[in-house]
Image (spheres, rainbow, N blue to C red):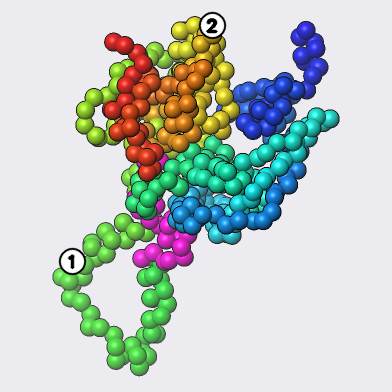
């Protein structure tokens, strides 16, 4: 039997839609994101997304995106660029041009012919990305699918939930709060937004003003130059000017200046953890929000940091589920609605994991797909597991709190911000 399995081609399950299409045909192999390179190198598995040939046939005519969703997309793109450019400055200019040239079409049908060796399947797709164009099926022209397509277009599928929350924000203040919750300094967000829009900052404007100054000794210089300030006035003005520039120039602040080495996780394989109770009372967010938001981060996290934090939360949740007697199936990173499928006898439990470096009583990255999984519980149970205090320098014990009840007043539906203090735990104590 083992020889038969090893002789059949195996594919890495890195695309949820493709995996669903070929699940009954081929062996699918799942690996955590941090182990994917080793799985490809040593196990001989091939990524499903790079192996399946997808031939799209969009229906006619091309319809416009609804005015409301189109407006929110255009308002969100500068914040998407601010986030991505804060992670990698090298491709910032190319990314800016790509976002500004992005087009979205809505079509009545979106057929896809999927080919994997001799296997063929025709499916209806919800969305597709072609060069600088996103194509949405008319029945799926919503924030969730648009966010998935945008994340694919930028080749960062793991950020789809974050983009969905940006699209659901009602104004730029809410969008900025989303970026701040990711650990970016306020001044850095403002600088990135100015740069995307082409508006110069104060330092850049100062340079332009200086370039327009008349040369010394010219007629204009002699007639219009202001009288020099006194020594006392100069001493009083200089600190104010420096302070203003410090706020807007985009120079590293105390927060952005934290070195990457500041972020360390506890030993997830060995660390002890406790089962927590839901937080009680108040509306203050806990310090040290999670990998995708909760409250503001203890550290500004890189993409690598966030992936490690997310994987740590999953690993601890798996440890607890196995301890409770479940067989656990980790889902692909872009799986909508939940991270882990756990089965025991005839019971199925779907778990969405939120991981945090410190304490977090508010989840900023809750999404509509996750809420629909919670609302649609038939034949399975859905729970949110909040994993806190994962940072190595956090003296509090790692805590896992399980939630199975999300009342209406806990959820801000305009931006899908979940207040855990109003939710209930599935653990009776």
| Magenta region includes residue 183 | yes
The 10 Å Cα crowd at callout 1, few under 14, some 14 to 19, many 20 or more, is: few
Task: Inspect the magenta stretch and tell me whether residue 73 lies in it.
Answer: no
Marker disc for residue 345:
2
**Which region shows up in magenta?**
179-202
* Residue extending farthest left: 232
Q: Residue furthest bottom?
A: 219
| Element marked by disc 1 | helix
Question: In percent of the image, x 77 and y 15: which residue is there?
Answer: 6
- Residue 127: x percent and y percent? 62, 44
Q: Is residue 261 visible?
A: no
Task: Check disc 1 and report the residue beneath it.
Answer: 236
Q: Is residue 157 above or below residue 264?
A: below
Q: What x and y, as percent, mark residue 46? A: 73, 29
For label 2, count other residues whose C-alpha is less than 10 Å away and answer few (under 14), some (14-19) or many (20+). few
**Residue drawn at x 32%, y 61% as measured from the top left:** 245
In this rendering, does residue 219 appear at all? yes
Mark-to-mark CA distance, 2 and 1: 76 Å
Give the quadrant of residue 8: top right
For marks 2 and 1, the one nearer the N-term is 1
Residue 216, how many percent across, how many down?
Answer: 37, 85
């Amino acid at each position: 039997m083992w020889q038969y399995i090893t002789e059949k081609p195996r594919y890495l399950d890195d695309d949820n839609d493709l995996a669903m299409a070929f699940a009954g045909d081929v062996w699918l192999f799942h690996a955590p994101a941090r182990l994917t390179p080793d799985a490809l190198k040593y196990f001989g598995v091939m990524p499903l997304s790079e192996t399946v040939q997808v031939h799209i046939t969009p229906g006619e005519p091309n319809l416009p995106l609804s005015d409301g969703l189109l407006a929110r997309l255009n308002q969100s793109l500068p914040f998407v660029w601010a986030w991505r450019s804060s992670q990698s400055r090298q491709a910032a200019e190319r990314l800016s041009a790509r976002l500004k040239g992005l087009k979205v079409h809505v079509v009545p049908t979106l057929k896809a012919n999927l080919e994997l060796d001799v296997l063929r399947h025709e499916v209806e797709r919800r969305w597709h990305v072609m060069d600088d164009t996103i194509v949405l099926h008319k029945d799926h022209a919503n924030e969730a699918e648009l966010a998935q397509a945008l994340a694919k277009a930028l080749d960062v599928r793991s950020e789809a939930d974050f983009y969905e929350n940006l699209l659901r924000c009602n104004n730029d203040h809410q969008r900025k709060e989303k970026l701040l919750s990711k650990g970016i300094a306020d001044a850095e967000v403002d600088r990135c937004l100015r740069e995307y829009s082409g508006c110069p900052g104060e330092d850049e404007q100062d340079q332009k003003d200086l370039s327009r100054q008349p040369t010394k000794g010219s007629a204009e210089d002699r007639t219009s130059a202001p009288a020099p300030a006194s020594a006392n006035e100069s001493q009083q003005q200089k600190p104010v000017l420096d302070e203003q520039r410090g706020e807007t120039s985009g120079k590293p602040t105390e927060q952005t200046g934290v070195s990457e080495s500041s972020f360390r996780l506890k030993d997830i394989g060995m660390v002890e953890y406790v089962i927590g109770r839901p937080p009680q009372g108040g509306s203050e967010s806990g310090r040290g929000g999670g990998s995708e938001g909760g409250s503001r981060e203890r550290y500004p996290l890189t993409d690598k940091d966030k992936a490690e934090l997310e994987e740590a939360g999953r690993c601890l949740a798996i440890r607890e589920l196995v301890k409770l007697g479940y067989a656990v199936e980790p889902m692909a990173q872009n799986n909508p609605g939940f991270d882990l499928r756990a089965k025991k006898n005839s019971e199925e439990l779907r778990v969405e994991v939120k991981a945090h470096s410190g304490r977090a009583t508010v989840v900023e990255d809750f999404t509509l797909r996750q809420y629909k999984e919670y609302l649609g519980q038939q034949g399975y149970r859905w729970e949110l597991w909040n994993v806190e205090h994962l940072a190595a320098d956090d003296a509090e014990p790692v805590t896992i709190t399980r939630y199975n009840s999300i009342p209406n007043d806990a959820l801000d539906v305009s931006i899908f911000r979940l207040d855990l203090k109003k939710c209930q735990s599935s653990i009776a104590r």
